[in-house]
Every structure is written in C-alpha cells, then in structure tokens.
C-alpha cells in the first residue's frame, strides 16, 4: 500500500474537481452504446 502526503491528496482532488467541471464536449466524447437489437429469428429450410 502506498502512503500519500496531504499535499498530493489535495492536488489529486483539485484535478478531479476540474475534470468534473469541464463540459462533456471538451473532455472528448465517450463512445455511445448501441441500442440492444435483440435476436432475429430466421427459419432454416429443410432443418428438423
């Protein structure tokens, strides 16, 4: 386990707050999840 100083902790928290306050577009867009399409059933001729 690593021990961090109070100064390092405060720097980390300040950086995290800054990232949170930045608008989404400035951060770089996240990948959008595709909507779940579900299964497509296709009958197979001459099977069973």
Image: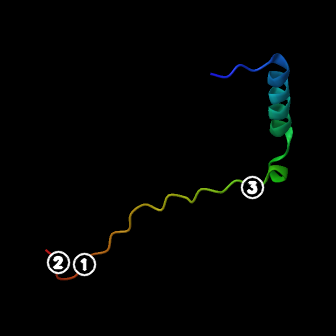
Q: Quadrant of residue 21?
A: top right
Whole-angstrom CA distance, mark 2 to mark 1, is 6 Å
Q: Work out which residue is located at the far top of the displayed protein and give it.
A: 6
Name which residue lies at 85% across and 27% down. 11
Which residue is identified by label 1?
A: 44
Q: Secondary structure at mark 2?
A: loop
Image position of 40 with respect to 17: above or below? below
Whole-angstrom CA distance, mark 3 to mark 2, is 46 Å
User: Of callouts 3 and 2, which one flags the residue occurring earlier in the amino acid sequence?
Assistant: 3
Which residue is identified by label 2?
A: 47
- Left or right: 17, with 44 as reference point: right
Name which residue lies at 84% across and 46% down. 23
Q: Are marks 3 and 1 in contact (CB under 8 Å)?
A: no
Q: Which mark is residue 35?
A: none
- Left or right: 15, with 38 as reference point: right
Q: Quadrant of the N terminus?
A: top right
Residue count near mark 3 (Cα–Cα under 10 Å), binned few <14, some 14–19, many ≥20: few
Please identify, in this view, whether the residue under mark 3 or under mark 1 is nearer the observer: 3
Q: Which mark is residue 29?
A: 3
Q: Are marks 2 and 1 in contact (CB under 8 Å)?
A: yes
């Amino acid at each position: 386990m690593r021990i961090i100083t109070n100064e390092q902790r405060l720097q980390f928290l300040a950086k995290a707050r800054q990232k949170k306050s930045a608008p989404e577009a400035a951060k770089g867009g996240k990948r959008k999840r595709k909507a779940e399409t579900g299964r497509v059933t296709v009958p197979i001729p001459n099977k069973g």
